Image (cartoon, rainbow, N blue to C red):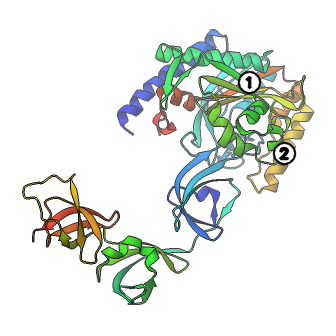
Amino acid sequence: MSTQTLLRNLRTRSALLRAVRDFFYAGEFLEIETPVKIPAPAPEEYIESVTAGQGEFLRTSPELAMKELLSLGVEKMFQIGSAFRAGEFGRKHREEFTILEYYASGWDYRQLADFTARMMQFAAEKILGKSDFVFDGRHFDMACVEYITVDEAFRKYAGVSAFEADKDNSFDEVMVLKVEPNLGKEGITFLCDYPAARASLSRLSRSNPLVAERWEVYVGGIELGNAFGELTDAVEQRRRFKEALAFRASCGMLPYPEPEAFYAALDRGLPDSSGCAIGFDRLTMLLTDSNDISLVRFG
Amino acid sequence: MYSASDLKKGLKIEIDGAPWQITEFEFCKPGKGTALYRCRMKNMITGIGMEKTYRPTDKIDEPNIEEREMYYSYFDGQNYVFSDPTTYEEMTVDPAVLGDKAYFLIEESLCNFVIYNDEPIEISLPTFIEKEIVETEPGVRGDTATNVTKPAKIDNGYEIQVPLFINQGDIVKIDTRTGAYAERVSKA
């Protein structure tokens, strides 16, 4: 990698930070900061936290803290900052990376998808002067937006049902090898409605409880972010976290304490809301035509 | 045993009793899903390629592979015999393992062996060897073009393509990795 390339990309990165902030400020989102060092990460099956000394962790995302703020009455907010995930290293992964996370009370997950598409279009236009661009030798347009459900995508690209793949424990392999390369082929793809077993922190769909109000957004086969119609049911959320903690214990993974402050927020009451986390480095990769994260981050 | 997190480009692993070397490696992780270690690999004996994806909990066998230098001693009529430069311990090698490389063996020359379960599976000769051309059409004087070639034989009958200016009795350098002419060392 040449220093020149990195410096050029860091200038674009700076412009992108500014464009994203402009977009959120124009939408009357409050920019907030929450602690990076926390007492308990979100109990998730496959997200490994970096420990930070006695009984503390580096956040894997600011999700729980931002939901505490939702419960305290902040209606629309965003945050740009570092998050840490142990053991993740590759062309699109670093243990330390930059996350752009945002929440809006009263919005459902589809509204949040439309908003996210507009944010990415706005960013591309600010940086490149247009919504279309070339990444890794292929042409994309942020104005071209596609919605597909997880099950439709699995059937179309892998010839299997997403529910079957989930049951026989091949979901992740099928996703990576067969489905992901076909997502965001021309622009932005929202992969929507995950099987209920993969709801994570999202609520189940009221019209179809087999799926969850969750989407992931892709451009050029690259997963840029994950969003939920937020689960507000305190009992159900505790049940899912206990299940995740039990799974972690059964696999001998690092034990996490229960996130008590977040439970208190759920008991206080979370408003109906949606939230999304975007990998800011990956968005920068796309808009600078960089095929490795090391080209868009210093250090 | 290796863990999946040990996987990387160049690593040698064992699958179903065969040695494989990873030629391409990518760390993948779909959203909230499990990490996947995606590998392209080459069978170190047959050269066949394949793709395989591992999860973090997978364990992978470590092949019993050693690399050592041996020098070429002699042909016993069926096999090639190599010797360890310090212990003089001998190892016989089936001609099939060497293939055309057998034509470039020079006594006392050090070769690099990759040994799997005590059997040599890959032998690298010194990259360049010098051989005398024993048979070829007379050279075309002054024609220094190297892209026009003609056949020529070395002492053991192996045929290579050489530039037109090469004559019988010239000493040439041959690249043992490709078996191709590299340059002229001296004129007859």
Compared across the picture, whether A209 is left or right of A130 comes to right
Depicted A37 relative to depicted A126: above or below? below
Which residue occupies 12% across, 54% down? Answer: B144
Quadrant in the rendering for residue A218: top right
The 10 Å Cα crowd at callout 2, few under 14, some 14 to 19, many 20 or more, is: few
Residue A238: name its quadrant: top right
Residue B124 seen in the current view: no
| Separation of marks 1 and 2 at Cα, in angstroms | 27 Å
Q: Quadrant of the C terminus of chain B?
A: bottom left
Q: Amino acid at mark 2?
A: Lys
Residue A7, horizontal then vertical, whole percent: 39, 30
* Quadrant holding the N terminus of chain B: bottom right
Q: Give left or right: position of A41 versus A81.
A: right
Q: Nearer the viewer, residue A45 or B38?
A: B38
Q: Which residue is rendered at x = 58% and y = 71% of the image?
A: B63
* Dot 1 crowding, Cα within 10 Å, few <14, some 14–19, many 20+: many
Question: In the image, which disc is placed on residue A167?
Answer: 2
Seen in the image, is A160 located left or right of residue B133? right
Camera-nearest residue between B48 and A28: B48
Residue B30 % position (x, y):
68, 40
Q: Residue B31, relative to residue A53: is it above or below?
A: above
Q: Is residue B135 visible?
A: yes
Q: Amino acid at mark 1?
A: Gly
What residue sits 63% from the left and 47% below the top? Answer: A86
| Picture coordinates of residue A186, whole percent (x, y) | 59, 23
B70 over A197 or under it: above or below: below
* Chain holding disc 2: A
Residue for point 86% across, 39% down:
A240
Q: How many marks?
A: 2
Tell me the element at label 2.
Answer: helix
